[in-house]
Every structure is written in C-alpha cells, then in structure tokens.
Amino acid sequence: MTNFLSGQLSGKGTVGRKAWDWGVSQGYSNAQLKVAVQQLSEAGVGVNKAPGQFFDQGGPMRGVAGIYSPDNPLGKFQGPGGNLGLKYYNQAKGAGWKPQEIYDEIQSGRSGMYMPIGAMNQYNRDIADEQAAQDAAKWRTDLQTQLTDLNNQINEPVEKPGVGYSASSVVGKSGTRGANLKIAGRGSRSGTSRWKRGGDSSWSMATVNTGGTSGKASNSSAVNV
C-alpha cells in the first residue's frame, strides 16, 4: 500500500525522520502519521527502529493511538490520503458503524482525520434516508393507531347495557300481549259491539214522548230515559 508518506522515504527506502517531519509540516496529526507509518510497514516498507534512530522504542509514535488502538477505532479505515474518504466511509459502514457514529467519531478529533466532500455528501444522504425511514415508520404507526381508534368507535354500542329502553318496553310482534291489551272476539259484548244500539240491555237511546192526541203537554216528561 502507498499513502501520503510514500514519497518521503529515506534514500534507503525506509520510513524515518524525513517522512515524519514532512508530515508534521503538512498539518497531519500524530495519529494520522502513526497509522500511515504502520500501513507502510505492513506493506513491506522498512521502519528504522535501530537504537539511536528516530523510531527507536517508538520515538514520536510512542503512546500515539494507531491502527489497532481502541482510542482510534476508525484508524483501521484511514485512507491513503490520511483521511476518511468515501470508499473508507463505506467500509466503516460495512463493518457495522452507523453514519452518525462515524461522523461523531471524526468530530471527536481522536483520529485526526476529516471527511472529504464525497464522504460528507454520502453521510448527508444517509442521514436524510434514515430520517425519511423514521418519518415513514411514525406515519404508519400513527395511522394504525387512528384506524384502531376508529374501529373501536364503530364497534362500540350506541347505548351501553342498562341505559335507555329495555327490550320489554318496546312493542313488537307481541306488543299487545306485553301491554296486556285484549281484543274481543267477534260477537263478544266486551268488544266494540257492546257500544252498538241494543248491544247491551242496560242502555238505550233517549225517546221522545209524543203525549196525547190533543197536542197539549201532559204532566209527564217529554223525554223518557
């Protein structure tokens, strides 16, 4: 692998003081530089760690969070340019990192990296997609809640048990029996025929007494009852 330090090797083709000092002058952090040195070492480039040399006992890299340090968890995804470009941003996602977690870790400054425009654009799209998915899920949940409430209202009785009229007070097919009304049969004196003339011997229409033949009023009443 080649990276931003590859062009700064010593005459012997090893990584040493020259490469490190150049990286510092370009604004790279110690974490970025250590990861870059480790990347070159794993690719077969020599690192001069001889006694008295620049990297003896770690040199300036001593105590710096590199590729395998838990204090630099995104270090393993550092790109050849020293930062987290689109390709390496996607690699981090593929390893289980969430977009917001990647962004927050970069913002912490522990890796010294930043996200170039390609990675930032993808991050912004990822966050927008996540928000859209959350909004859609919330909309579906709210709609289901509304439909459930509406269904419960539709299925709720108009009058709850014990409220309003009871079944026995409503006149239906057997309403006359429920009201204790009796309809007399044909010819019965207890029916409507009892009101007809002659239907009851105890009642008769008033009659006019015409009196005697002389047309003079008699002492008797003109009307017999």
Image (cartoon, helix red, strand yellow):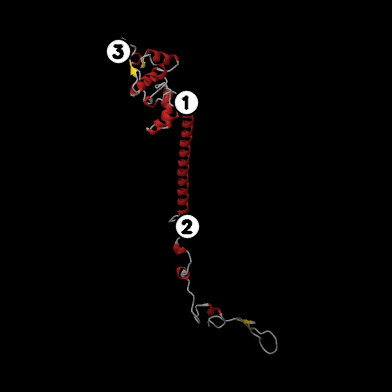
Looking at the rendered image, the disc whose residue lies closer to the viewer, 1 or 3, is 3
Task: Give 222 or 82, whichever is nearer the viewer.
Answer: 82
| Disc 3 secondary structure class | loop
**Where, quadrant-wise, is the N terminus in this rendering?**
top left
Q: CA distance from mark 2 to mark 3?
A: 101 Å
Looking at the rendered image, the disc whose residue lies closer to the viewer, 2 or 3, is 3
Which quadrant holds residue 114?
Answer: top left
Residue 193, percent from left and from top = 53, 80
Q: CA distance from mark 1 to mark 3?
A: 37 Å
**In the depicted structure, whether residue 148 falls above or below residue 124:** below
Task: Give 16 or 44, whichever is nearer the viewer.
Answer: 44
Q: Let me know if residue 44 appears in the view.
A: yes
**In the depicted structure, whether residue 10 falls above or below residue 179:** above
Please tell me how crowded label 2 is: few (under 14), some (14-19), or many (20+) other residues with Cα within 10 Å.
few
Looking at the rendered image, the disc whose residue lies closer to the viewer, 1 or 2, is 1
Task: Give 173 or 191, whichever is nearer the viewer.
Answer: 173
Q: CA distance from mark 1 to mark 2?
A: 74 Å
Name the kind of residue labelled 1 in the image: Pro
Residue 185's disc number: none
Mark 2 and mark 3 lie on one chain; the one further toward the N terminus is 3
Residue 164's disc number: 2
**In the depicted structure, whether residue 165 falls above or below residue 51:** below
Residue 105, percent from left and from top = 41, 26
Q: Which residue is mark 3?
A: 50
**Disc 2, disc 3: CB below 8 Å?**
no
Residue 116's disc number: 1
Name the kind of residue labelled 2 in the image: Gly
Name the kind of residue labelled 3 in the image: Ala
Which residue in the rendered view is the most extreme toward the bottom? 213
| Disc 1 secondary structure class | loop
